[in-house]
Image: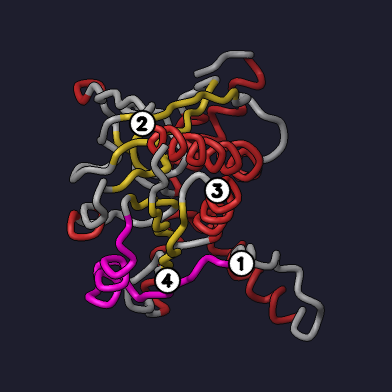
Amino acid sequence: MSSLRIVVLTCGDLGVRVANALSADGVSQVVGLVVAPFDRRPRKTFRAKFRHVIRRQGWRGLFAVLGSKIASLARVGEPSAVVPPVALAPGIERFDVTDFHSPESLSIIEALRPDLAILAGTYILKESVFALPRHGSINLHSGKVPEYRGAAPAFWELYHGEKEVGVTIHRVDASLDAGPVLTLEMFPIDPAPGGDPLAYIEQFRQEVLGPNGVRMLVETVRALAQGTAKEIPQNHAVARTFRSPDYRAVRELLSRVRARRRGGGTK
């Protein structure tokens, strides 16, 4: 067995959970956690924010956002209900950068001398980042590849009436979610959930996709360290890549779920 020097790249708490789990496993050494903000764009003007909400959520969504803002102002001074961030385990050094592609970030990653980088909840990275470690990078993707590459885990599966959602650990290459697969597992999803389907998706992500993705990453890194990991090329001919859903897609999802509840179908 050969211990690997691991650097974790993330834009949020998922990467902290991954780093903690890998550190606790003890097979490989987590030499650093590099964190960048997910949204690197300039702050939107009021008009741009207005148009963005309308496009994504419609007029009803706009009123909901305004109502939420008003309610938050009314709660000023009250105890916060925000969930605290996940604490990083002792012994793991954290580096906050403005962009994974910045000279500062590249210098940090290079100085850590990692054998492998793990991407856990990042934006799309260029080869200058993911090819920097000695053995390249692997990515945690919530979705079965090649059929569900891209954004919005569990949303498009529920939209299409699937009965399972995949979690994939794959090699990172120049195309989005297209590298050889190291690990893939499927998890059952209700195609006609009761209550709010969007709330169901979020709960499914938090309770099923996230924890299993962390577990699978630990198991995959262990297999890589032991030399037992197998890589399976993807069938690019059947690949589909999805974007973040807009308001029309959300409305159609709600309509499809209601129809399934009435008819017992899956489409």
Residue displayed at 37% across by 76% down: 44
Residue wearing tag 1: 90
- Element assignment for label 3: loop
Q: Is residue 92 magenta?
A: yes
Residue wearing tag 2: 227
Q: In terms of sequence position, does the residue under pointer 2 or pointer 3 come before the other?
A: 3
Tell which of 106 and 60 is nearer to you: 106
Q: Which mark is residue 196?
A: none
Tell which of 182 and 45 is nearer to you: 182
Q: In terms of sequence position, does the residue under pointer 2 or pointer 4 come before the other?
A: 4
Distance between the alpha carbons at the discs numbered 2 and 3: 16 Å
Distance between the alpha carbons at the discs numbered 2 and 4: 49 Å
Distance between the alpha carbons at the discs numbered 1 and 2: 28 Å
Q: In terms of sequence position, does the residue under pointer 1 or pointer 3 come before the other?
A: 3
Location of residue 261 with respect to 219 vertically, above or below: above
Query: Do callouts 1 and 3 mark residues in contact (Cβ within 8 Å)?
Result: no
Residue wearing tag 4: 49
- Element assignment for label 1: loop
Residue stretch in magenta: 91-114
